[in-house]
Image: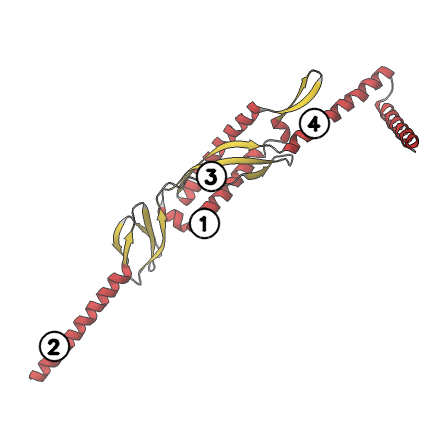
Amino acid sequence: MELGLIESLVIFALLSLTAIIIVIIFFKTGKKEINPNEALVYKNQWTGKAKVKMAGTTILTPGINKEITRVSLKDEPHDPAETKINLSDGTEIGVDYVITKQKVVDPIKSAIEINYEDRDKIIRKRIEVFFQDELVKYSGKSFVLEEKENGKKTIKKKDEELKLAMETTETAVNRKIKDTIEKNWGIEVEIGIENFNLPPKLLEVAEEAATAVTEGERIKIKAQNAGVDVKWVFLGDIITDAIRAYKGEKGGK
């Protein structure tokens, strides 16, 4: 009788110890400390539904709830590198912009819909697409102006047009960001355009174009004064240039 009682006590003690060990393991593996300005996104492996826990101490049931990632709730503004965009005529300009705001407003979407760890790169790529969509409406000629000063032609930037284009593009891109990035990925983002950097070659190309137009007008006026077809004046100029070139080569020998 006493032996049976002792065996029962031993079994009870072993069961109690096992239960205590299970509880310790449960709390040790399931206990999560979540920092301020941080959210823990996890998934119920039975239902597949994602949920979120905010700052503090929480328990995720082992075998049922699995942590997906931790999401920062801080604002993360930053200054990306200049991005190159092609205009409608193939002119490449540099867009100098800053991300003035980048803040998670829906932790679950930001953790599920994109690779959260690569969020900066993914967001920048999408913004570049938005820039391309907007700037294809312009060409290189949209931003340069031919002027005459003391009889000399110069090519200058159209500062007012550039400023207006930057403001228009900034507004349009921010609207697209709100309609897509914030709505679909749960991240509020705002950008500010600081400058459109025109390539130095654009001014050279514009100068060449202006020269070509001037030469065409000269030939047209010359033909009108002579009362002949433009093509004969053009042909005559070619022959004259060839003769001059020949004489120049001969004289140099």
Q: Residues within 10 Å of mark 4 (few under 14, many from 20)?
A: some
- Amino acid on which disc 2 is placed: Leu
Question: Label 2: which residue?
Answer: 9
Report whether 205 appears left or right of 182: right
Which residue is drawn at the image coordinates 40% and 51% (left, top)?
112
**Gap between marks 3 and 1 measured at Cα:** 16 Å
Disc nearest the viewer among 3 and 2: 3
Query: Circle 2: is it few (<14), some (14-19), or many (20+) Cα within 10 Å?
Result: few
Residue at the spot of label 1: 118
Label 4 vs 1, first from the N-terminus: 1
Q: Amino acid at mark 4?
A: Glu
Which residue, given by chain and number where applicable, does mark 3 sit on? Answer: 79
Q: Amino acid at mark 3?
A: Asp
Q: Nearer the viewer's eye, disc 4 or disc 1?
A: 4
Residue located at (36% from left, 48% from top): 71
Q: Please determine whether, in this image, residue 117 is positioned above or below residue 130.
A: below
- Indicate left or right for 230 with 5 as reference: right
Q: Nearer the viewer, residue 177 or 146?
A: 146
Q: Which residue is mark 4?
A: 207
Q: CA distance from mark 4 to mark 1?
A: 44 Å
Q: Which corner quadrant holds the N terminus?
A: bottom left
Asked if 207 appears above or below 35 in the picture, the reply is: above
- Three-letter code, disc 1: Asp
Give the SS element for disc 1.
Answer: helix
Could you tell me residue 86's position as x and y percent?
Answer: 60, 37
